[in-house]
């Protein structure tokens, strides 16, 4: 699935291939990387899709009586659904970026968003889909499956599901919309994002509470305006924070329930705890995040007492322990944040294993260490063509499940064409079996090395240095 974007913030034009398992955004500050990451999140997040596609009584009755049903999907309706969702996202960019609605025209009137597949390609991909997935929605569990060469979707309920009125209402107004979302944006089932503000979300979640801010805004408007319908306020979106931050706060407010869930990627979380944090991140029954160091396991530190690396990585650890599912897209803004170079390299290798276990990644980075380690993982993946690399890769500690295939990877450089340019170009970076180069990082490092060498030799040889 390729998306094309024009005139979004600093970005003049960009085309991103979300079919790749790893997309890397590179470039100077203020070039639009975060804006594009937010947009990708909005397009791919399951929880942000609209509801309202009514499931017919026939299918509801089958699910209630037999716990299973089969629905034939009309491809043209699925195609129209995706087009409508993209249009809805465009119309609500003000909400995504926390801009006042009356300023939307000023900031986003020229923005264009498009998914580049043709209908024929979309239809072919849908026909070839072959999958079986367990989906959890609003606390309800389903298995959704599709067989190749058919247009039918099979839905199976958990046999222990309580079929009360709330559940029946969910079936009617939400289930079909969620099925459409999964199919229309396949193979990405849903996405989660870790913005740079992630190290503050758990620290200040109570102060930044979405629920509290919603109440405050309602009271404020009701007290200042006499002629206002309270129901309009109830359904009015909260735009105090950008959507990724709002969603992160909602997760933080629901940790007491989240910690009861278990993810198939739990072991990756424990590896991060062992190799990077040297301790354990836990969630109490009250939903508070605590950390205990391996050096003092009986001492429980509250989140605000913990080190910066714990604050930065805890949200990822909790996601991998409790929420991650196969075919999720994980978007991380600056994964190197607060990490020593050694830990940046370790985290990059964990990312590679996650990718090879079904998680997709979009990262934006300024880290030469992450870029170099990605290059190493691409190079060691050539062991089939270069048997002499096998022993060397083992000697260096690289495992086969860390290899990154070149076809699964894409990198992009965000940059201004020249000093007078007002918008950035987003250019695919050439990548081969040796990896890729980021010219903005390389030039900075070369300039720094040149200055260091000149100063060193001037100090060493004094007047004799030329």
Image (tube, rainbow, N blue to C red):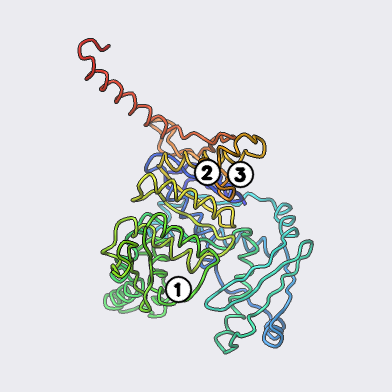
Q: CA distance from mark 3 to mark 1?
A: 34 Å
Q: Residues within 10 Å of mark 1 (few under 14, many from 20)?
A: some
Q: Earlier in the sequence, mark 3 or mark 1?
A: 1
Q: Is residue 358 above or below residue 65?
A: above
Position of residue 72 in the picture relative to residue 133 (left or right): right
SS label for mark 1: helix
Tell me how far mark 1 sits from mark 2, CA to CA.
Answer: 36 Å
- Figure quadrant of residue 10: top left
The answer to whether 397 appears left or right of 282 in the picture is right
Nearest the eye: 454 or 333: 454
- Compare residues 226 and 134 and report the one nearer the observer: 134
Q: Are marks 1 and 2 in contact (CB under 8 Å)?
A: no
Query: Which quadrant: the C terminus?
Result: top left
Residue drawn at point x = 43 percent, y = 75 percent: 235
Q: Are marks 3 and 1 in contact (CB under 8 Å)?
A: no
Residue designated by label 3: 405
The Cα–Cα distance between marks 3 and 2, rounded to whole angstroms, is: 24 Å
Q: Which circle marks residue 14 in the picture?
A: 2
Residue of label 1: 258
How busy is the neighbourhood of tag 3: few (under 14 within 10 Å), some, or many (20 plus)?
some
Name the outermost residue toward the top.
464
Q: Which of pointers 3 and 2 lies earlier in the amino acid sequence?
A: 2
Q: State which quadrant residue 164 falls in.
A: bottom right
Which x, y percent locates residue 286?
35, 78
Question: Which numbered circle lies on residue 26?
Answer: none
Rendering quarter of residue 123: bottom right
């Amino acid at each position: 699935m390729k998306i094309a974007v024009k005139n979004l913030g600093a970005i003049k034009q960009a085309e991103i291939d979300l079919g790749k398992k790893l997309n890397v955004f590179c470039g100077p500050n203020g070039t639009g990387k975060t804006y594009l990451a937010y947009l990708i999140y909005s397009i791919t997040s399951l929880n942000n899709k609209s509801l309202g596609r009514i499931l017919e009584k026939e299918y509801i009755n089958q699910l209630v009586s037999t716990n299973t049903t089969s629905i034939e999907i009309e491809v043209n309706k699925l195609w129209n659904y995706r087009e409508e969702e993209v249009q809805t996202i465009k119309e609500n960019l003000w909400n995504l970026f926390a801009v006042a609605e009356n300023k939307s025209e000023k900031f986003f009137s020229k923005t264009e968003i498009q998914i580049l597949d043709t209908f024929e390609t979309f239809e072919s991909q849908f026909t070839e889909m072959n999958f079986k997935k367990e989906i959890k929605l609003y606390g309800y569990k389903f298995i959704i499956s599709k067989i190749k060469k058919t247009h039918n979707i099979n839905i199976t309920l958990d046999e222990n599901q309580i079929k009360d009125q709330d559940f029946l209402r969910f079936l009617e107004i939400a289930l079909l919309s969620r099925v459409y979302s999964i199919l229309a944006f396949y193979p990405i089932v849903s996405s989660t994002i870790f913005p740079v503000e992630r190290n503050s979300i758990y620290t200040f979640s109570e102060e930044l509470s979405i629920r509290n801010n919603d109440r405050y805004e309602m009271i404020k408007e009701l007290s200042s305006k006499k002629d206002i319908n309270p129901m309009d306020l109830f359904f009015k979106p909260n735009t105090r924070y950008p959507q990724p931050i709002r969603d992160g706060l909602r997760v933080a407010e629901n940790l007491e329930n989240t910690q009861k869930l278990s993810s198939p990627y739990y072991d990756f979380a424990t590896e991060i705890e062992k190799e990077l944090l040297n301790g354990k991140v836990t969630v109490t029954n009250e939903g508070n995040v605590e950390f205990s160091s391996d050096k003092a396991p009986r001492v429980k530190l509250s989140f605000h007492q913990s080190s910066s690396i714990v604050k930065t990585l805890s949200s990822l650890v909790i996601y991998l322990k409790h929420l991650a599912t196969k075919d999720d897209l994980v978007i991380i803004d600056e994964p190197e944040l607060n990490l020593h170079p050694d830990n940046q390299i370790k985290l990059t290798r964990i990312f590679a294993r996650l990718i090879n276990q079904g998680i997709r990644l979009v990262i934006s980075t300024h880290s030469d260490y992450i870029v170099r380690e990605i290059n190493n993982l691409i190079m060691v993946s050539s062991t089939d063509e270069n048997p002499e690399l096998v022993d060397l890769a083992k000697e260096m500690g690289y495992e086969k499940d860390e290899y990154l295939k070149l076809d699964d990877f894409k990198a992009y450089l965000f940059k201004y064409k020249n000093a007078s340019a007002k918008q950035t170009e987003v250019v695919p970076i050439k990548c081969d079996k040796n990896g890729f180069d980021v010219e903005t990082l390389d030039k900075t490092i070369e300039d720094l090395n040149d200055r260091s060498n000149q100063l060193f030799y001037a100090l060493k040889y004094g007047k004799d240095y030329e």
